[in-house]
Image (tube, helix red, strand yellow):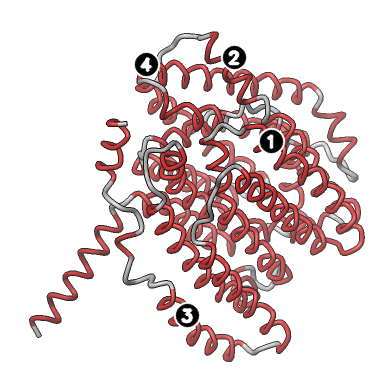
Amino acid sequence: MLSGIVRIYAKARSLFAFVGRDYFLYLLPSVLQSVVGLMLVPVTTYYLNPVDFGIFALMGAVAIPVKSIAATGARWVLGGNYFQASDGERRTMLFNVLVSELVLRTALIMVLTVLAEPILHAVVLDYRAEYLTYFYLTLGAAWAGSLWSAISFLMTLQSRAHSFALYSSLQVTVNAIVTVVGLMVLKLGVEALFLGALVSGVASMVFEVLYVRRYVSAKLSGRWLREIVRMGLPATPGGLAELVAGIAEKVLIQRWAGLSALGLYSHSQQYQSIFKMLTAALNNVLTPASLRTYSGHESADAQERILTYWYGILGATGVCVAMLSDNVIGFLTHGKFTAAASLVQIWYLIVFSVSHGNPYANFLMARKYNRALMYTQLVPTLLGIGIVAAATYLYGIHGAAWALVSTSVLIQTARRIVAGRLGYRGVAERRFAEALGAYLALWVLDGFFKWTLLTELVVAALILPLLIARFRLLTHLSQVVPGDNRSIRKGKENS
């Protein structure tokens, strides 16, 4: 009896230790986003229809230039210089990066604001006057997010997981509250989605400025401005390719499949955004360890543990995605968006692709191979535009989804080849293959045999314990990230 209590206590201590580690804190916003997103689905799909989601997606696509072109490559600049710079140099570098990001984004938004009406007339088939208001709201939200990319990456480099979790959760919470109030209380319709994005962005920006003021020195530096141009300039071609690809994807679906199909497609991407946040949580933990490893400060053991555990999570979660997506989405959306389930299963492949490619990108970033990062993004993305156009024309929204998955795989494959030639050695490759194989096998089998819900639940109940045991998810729960947050930060200071 006593030994049993001791074992339970030990497991509880391991769980609480895990909760205090960076990984969980980086994962927390993703979990919150997942929970809040799923809670919002019945509300938004009750008040809105596929066409509304199509409009929201189309306005976001037209505003893509703000994110794709108005970028200085802040992550490349910070990632390539942060661990080599002194504290004073870091402060000046960060100030120049933030000012450059804000100025560039503000300038482009002003141009788009002036040209908004002719742009919408050219892009939207059935133009309406209210679309102009939607577009202005979208641009406002894009401006409010000017600093987040650089500041969130700074938090990652500093291992300020608590701050990252707090600020990310703030965005999710405010967005959800404003959206619900707009739909249920103010009866705004699709405007509630735009207002949610705008208000959450403005609220986050205020707190971002309060956070970052401790880490900047307000001084323009020719050295760092030149470094931003030198290291950030390679991000521009990739941004232009991303711009064309992002606009083409939504506009072509609208023209060849209609706003309703675009709405289904956009709704499926809500679940994809949850996958992206989960992958971002992985990258936020993996990036500092990777950059220090590839800068010669640490071994690859930390990466091995993180990736092994992560691939186990992907495999276990993939069991549910492969077999239960249609039932879950049908229940959440009152049966109005069930057709989006097959797209969600396709999007899950991007999680595997991006997760597998993160170490390659971090290796190239740490070694300052920015041109390699540029070309491995630019060339596959340009090829992907043609693939997306042809696949959308021939196979509709499913063709577009498969084309984007193919583009992601091309990018990661290109980076793996380049990194391998430059000395990169694979990490947890076998575990990745096992997790991906499990997902694909269940997806194919379920589609081929058309299992009933009861059969799917039974198969899931049998497979999940096997995957949990294979990847030792419970055994190593508290060992995902070696050391605690303080020791990681101490190590950085010593370096």
* Closer mark to the observer between disc 2 and disc 3: 2
Image location (x, y in percent) of residue 85? 41, 22
Q: Which residue is mark 2?
A: 226
Labels 3 and 1: the sequence-earlier one = 1
Residue 494 position (above or below residue 253):
above
CA separation, marks 4 and 1?
Answer: 29 Å
- Percent x, y of residue 308: 45, 63
Instruction: Give above or below for 207 relative to 416.
Output: above
Is 90 rendered above or below residue 277?
above
- Nearer the camera: disc 4 or disc 1: 1
What amino acid is labelled 1 in the image? Met
Q: Residues within 10 Å of mark 1 (few under 14, many from 20)?
A: some
Q: Nearer the viewer, mark 4 or mark 3?
A: 4
Image quadrant assignment for residue 32? bottom left
Give the left or right position of residue 468, taking residue 142 as reference: left
Which residue in the protein does label 4 denote? 88
Which sits in the foreground, 22 or 87? 87
Q: Earlier in the sequence, mark 4 or mark 3?
A: 4
Kindly report the distance in space between the C-alpha atoms of the residues bearing marks 1 and 2.
Answer: 18 Å
Residue tagged by mark 1?
374
Q: Looking at the picture, how far across and down is residue 137, in whole percent?
A: 66, 34
What whole-number distance in Å separates the C-alpha atoms at marks 2 and 4? Answer: 18 Å
Tag 3 secondary structure: helix
Could you say which disc has been placed on residue 464 in the image? 3
In space, the residues marked 3 and 1 are separated at their CA atoms by: 39 Å
Residue 179 visible in the snapshot: yes
